[in-house]
Image (tube, helix red, strand yellow):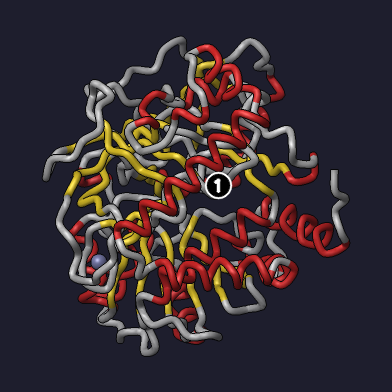
């Protein structure tokens, strides 16, 4: 097994600082520098592959599928056993139809087989533990390749930015669920990437604090805004209601992690006077899709993974306008392979070619991620996407759900596992308060069952506030 070099050590150390949510000013920048070659090569590859023909995309994806399946059979115990049990031979998987011989990978299977899904041919220090936010149930733990996966992800984001005129040294404002250490002092932001990006907390955006947000953005003069559509919408509404001038240098907005509604996209384009792109990506890193220069439909990056739309009987969908579950096989993460992973998200199939000329698979609309809020007594709206915590404090929680029927009060329902103890309750409360901040009363409630929606999905938040209880921002 190869030894990690000095560069790798520094990069991994910085990555851990990043994962701590305690990002130092330069952590992200240093990770890029240390892995610059990978970043640069990925960017170069993606620039070229955008113009590939359908045939070339197909050849590339088949090659990657073959590599991934061979690697998984040889190095990942779960797949070795699965293939042997089902009589699947690597040489039998020669086209996309053959792929259907492989049973789906579900969140439940990942949860039960986390150790057996790790590739044995990677050194220990390469594994980085992550969790999903659990918008459709309890958070899911898995691994990716420390630093490397992160840098590759940045290369994909850069390719998206290129669609809206990115230039070296452009600056970003980011709205997401990051914990900002200085909020108590009224500083709702922190710098990262050598100061080129200004990360704002999406938790404190109320009437009282928004003037400070606006002032800071005006001083910073960003070219791009990236983040939760709900948070950027709150900012936009405030700008509109208070007749604040448009930000001067803005070239584009990229929304992600939540559904971007059509009304929101139109509203944001009007208020900010720039193009708004929609991005769909999962923590599990199996699918990455973005709208383009010409269309609001989601263009799936074929380099990132292979995506199937599946009907309720598990069959592939290829009829115009038909809705199906997104099942994805990721090419990026060989360290913990996701093959035919059922994402729980739904998309609408289309076979129409986009005016932009790209030949990738296009999905019209993503359903499954709701845009929901917890409301504090002072009217702050905390998006469920912001509760996507990369934390292991929920390891002993089987399922959870927020319940709110009174402004400023929220109940956190928990289905415990057998290892759950008083210590977990303390840690969970501490972690949630860190995210929720003040002016909210949080209670834990232990339950045996959490009711599912009519689609059989788990709702992350049951929110029963009426319009009057909601802030005027909506
Ligand atoms: Zn297009």
Which residue does the image show at 54% across and 59% down from the upper left? 153
Q: Tell me where residue 258 appears, x and y as whole percent.
A: 35, 50
Quadrant in which residue 22 is drawn: bottom right
Dot 1 corresponds to which residue? 435
Image quadrant for the C terminus? bottom left
Q: Does any atom of ligand 1 lie closer than 8 Å to the CB of label 1?
A: no
Q: Tell me where residue 262 appears, x and y as whole percent.
A: 18, 58
Which residue does the image show at 46% across and 53% down from the upper left? 304
Looking at the picture, tell me which residue is in the foreground, 123 or 260.
123
Element at label 1: helix
Give the number of callouts. 1
Task: From the viewer's perspective, tell me whether residue 406 is left or right of residue 442.
Answer: left
Which residue does the image show at 51% across and 24% down from the upper left? 89
Determine if residue 16 is in view.
yes
Taking 263 as reference, is 211 above or below it? below
Q: How many residues crowd around disc 1 within 10 Å: few (fewer than 14), some, or many (20 or more)?
A: many
Q: Tell me where residue 435 appears, x and y as whole percent.
A: 55, 47
Task: From the viewer's perspective, tell me whether residue 420 is left or right of residue 138.
Answer: right
Taking 227 as reference, is 125 above or below it? above
Taking 210 as reference, is 386 above or below it? above
Outermost left residue: 320
Which residue does the image show at 51% across and 68% down from the upper left? 45
Task: From the viewer's perspective, tell me whether residue 139 is left or right of residue 33.
Answer: left
Image quadrant for the N terminus? top right
Determine if residue 410 is in view.
no
Q: Tell me where residue 278 appears, x and y as whole percent.
A: 32, 61
Looking at the picture, tell me which residue is in the foreground, 334 or 210.
334
Task: From the viewer's perspective, tell me whether residue 170 is left or right of residue 229.
Answer: right
Of the four image quadrants, the one with ligand 1 is bottom left
Outermost front residue: 91
């Amino acid at each position: 097994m190869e030894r990690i070099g000095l560069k790798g050590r520094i990069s991994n150390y910085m990555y851990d600082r990043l994962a701590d949510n305690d990002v130092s000013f330069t952590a992200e920048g240093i990770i890029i520098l240390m892995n610059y070659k990978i970043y640069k090569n990925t960017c170069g590859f993606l620039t070229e592959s955008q113009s590939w023909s359908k045939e070339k995309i197909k050849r590339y994806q088949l090659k990657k599928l073959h590599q991934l399946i061979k690697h998984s059979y040889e190095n990942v115990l779960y797949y070795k056993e699965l293939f042997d049990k089902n009589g699947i031979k690597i040489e039998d998987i020669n086209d996309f139809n053959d792929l259907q011989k492989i049973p789906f990978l579900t969140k439940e299977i990942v949860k039960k087989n986390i150790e057996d899904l790790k590739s044995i041919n990677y050194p220990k220090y390469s594994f980085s533990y992550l969790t999903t936010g659990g918008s459709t149930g309890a958070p899911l733990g898995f691994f990716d390749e420390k630093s490397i996966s992160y840098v590759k992800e940045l290369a994909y984001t850069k390719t998206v930015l290129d669609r809206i005129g990115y230039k070296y040294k452009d600056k970003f404002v980011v709205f997401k669920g990051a914990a900002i250490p200085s909020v108590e002092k009224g500083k709702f932001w922190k710098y990262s990437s050598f100061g080129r990006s200004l990360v704002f907390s999406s938790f404190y955006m109320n009437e009282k604090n928004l003037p400070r947000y606006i002032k800071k953005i005006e001083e910073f003069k960003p070219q791009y805004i990236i983040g939760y559509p709900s948070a950027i919408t709150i900012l936009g509404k405030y700008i509109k209601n208070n007749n604040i001038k448009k930000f001067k240098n803005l070239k584009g907005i990229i929304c992600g992690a939540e559904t971007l509604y059509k009304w929101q996209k139109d509203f944001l384009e009007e208020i900010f006077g720039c193009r708004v792109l929609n991005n769909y990506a999962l923590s599990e890193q199996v699918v990455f899709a973005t709208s383009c220069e010409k269309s609001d439909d989601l263009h799936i990056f074929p380099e990132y993974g292979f995506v199937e739309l599946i009907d309720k009987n598990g069959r592939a969908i290829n009829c115009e306008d038909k809705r199906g579950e997104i099942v994805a096989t990721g090419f990026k993460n060989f360290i913990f392979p996701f093959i035919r992973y059922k994402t729980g998200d739904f998309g609408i199939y289309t076979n129409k070619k986009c005016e932009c000329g790209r030949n990738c698979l296009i999905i019209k609309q993503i359903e499954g991620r709701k845009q929901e809020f917890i409301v504090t007594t002072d009217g702050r709206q905390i998006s469920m996407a912001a509760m996507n915590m990369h934390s292991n404090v929920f390891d002993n929680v089987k399922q959870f759900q927020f319940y709110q029927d009174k402004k400023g009060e929220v109940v956190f329902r928990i289905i415990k596992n057998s290892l759950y103890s008083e210590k977990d309750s303390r840690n969970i409360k501490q972690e949630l308060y860190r995210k929720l901040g003040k002016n909210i009363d949080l209670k834990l409630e232990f339950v045996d069952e959490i009711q599912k929606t009519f689609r059989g999905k788990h709702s992350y938040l049951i929110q029963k506030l009426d319009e009057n209880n909601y802030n005027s921002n909506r």
